[in-house]
Amino acid sequence: MARGTERGGASGERARYWQYAELPGVDLLHAHYIHKAFARHTHETFVFAAITEGVEAFHSRDELVHAGPGQIALVNPDTPHTGHAGVPEGWTYRTIYPDAEIVRSIAADTLALRGEAGFTTPVVDDPYAAQLVVGVHRAAEEGNALAADSLLRLVTARLLRSHGGLVTPLPPRSAGARNAARAREVLQAGMVGPPTLERLASDLGTSPFALLRAFREAYGMPPHTWLTDARVRRARQLLDAGTPPAEAAVAVGFTDQSHLSRHFTRSVGVPPGAYQRARGSGRGTPRGGTRA
């Protein structure tokens, strides 16, 4: 059974973020955006976004790339990226968000890759693979579990063969990288009442500017942007567990539900209430198999 929510309006934009119960560990998004701009954010899952109309432009790390019809935007877990229209008419895409463990198991099964498998390029020009992504959506919409699962595995294996490999990150070596990692731990543990940049740098024995530069180099965004992203990700976990949006907002350090909604929509594509209804988690249904 599919559960989801579709949002549209006078702007001509529409988005359906949903989940098919027979495809656990995978979220689905079918959207048309014109004016929407995704803030720099990360996902715990992989992202396979097949563009069907228009052009999406997005920063992958610090590189601005474009994806058009027949192409797939690929994002690895925990990789900072943005998203906005690359042409005035916007873009339409069908996106699948497979859990990292699903991709790792397919990599091990088909390519004997054991470890942190991922993709080495942010845009793939492969119309057949794009059709497979669309096929996953259509099979889920039709309630065809066998086809949805089969097509998901076929497209993942195809993309891994052509643009995949092991992407195990190197451990931090410099003093700046170590300070960035320690700063991240502090922010993660204290996201409700984080310190100022000056206080954080002082506690780590460095300067604010040096910490800002090291953090951006290590994680692709400055500490305040990383913290907002971490709050949204934690809010998603709370929403998945059935926590009301207003309570989730306060629990992760946002001032109120509207503050959460603004940042959540800029990262996920739909507001927190719509996201929760789409996943059925307002009734306490946990996310199947689990990673935006």
Image (spheres, rainbow, N blue to C red):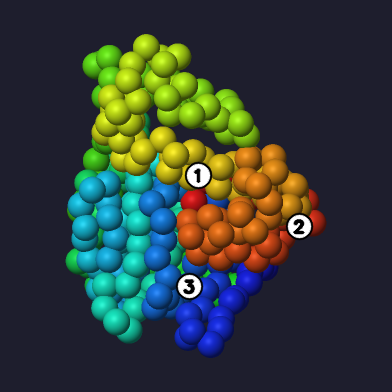
Q: Residue at x 56, y 81 (%)?
A: 8
Residue 278: percent from left, percent from top? 65, 65
Residue pointed to by mark 2: 282
Label 3 vs label 1, nearer the camera? 1
Secondary structure under tag 2 reads helix
Are there few (<14), some (14-19), or many (20+) residues within 10 Å of tag 3? Answer: some
Q: Residue at x 37, y 12 (%)?
A: 205
Looking at the image, which is closer to me, 136 or 204? Answer: 204
| 3D distance between C-alphas at marks 2 and 1 | 23 Å
Hey, which residue is sitting farthest front in the picture?
198
Number of marks drawn: 3
Looking at the image, which is closer to me, 86 or 259? Answer: 259
Residue pointed to by mark 3: 30
The kind of residue tagged 3 is: His
Image marks 3 and 1: residues in contact by CB distance under 8 Å: no
Looking at the image, which is closer to me, 269 or 205? Answer: 205
Hey, which residue is sitting farthest top in the picture?
205
Residue 180: percent from left, percent from top? 36, 24
Q: Is 117 drawn above or below residue 36 in the view shown?
A: above
The kind of residue tagged 1 is: Thr
Residue pointed to by mark 1: 228
Q: Is 80 drawn above or below residue 125 in the view shown?
A: above
Q: Earlier in the sequence, mark 3 or mark 1?
A: 3
Label 2 vs label 1, nearer the camera? 1
| 3D distance between C-alphas at marks 3 and 1 | 25 Å
Residue 21: percent from left, percent from top? 64, 60
| 3D distance between C-alphas at marks 3 and 2 | 21 Å
Q: Quadrant of residue 213?
A: top left
Q: Residue at x 34, y 41 (%)?
A: 221
Are there few (<14), some (14-19), or many (20+) residues within 10 Å of tag 1? Answer: many
Image disc number at residue 105 = none
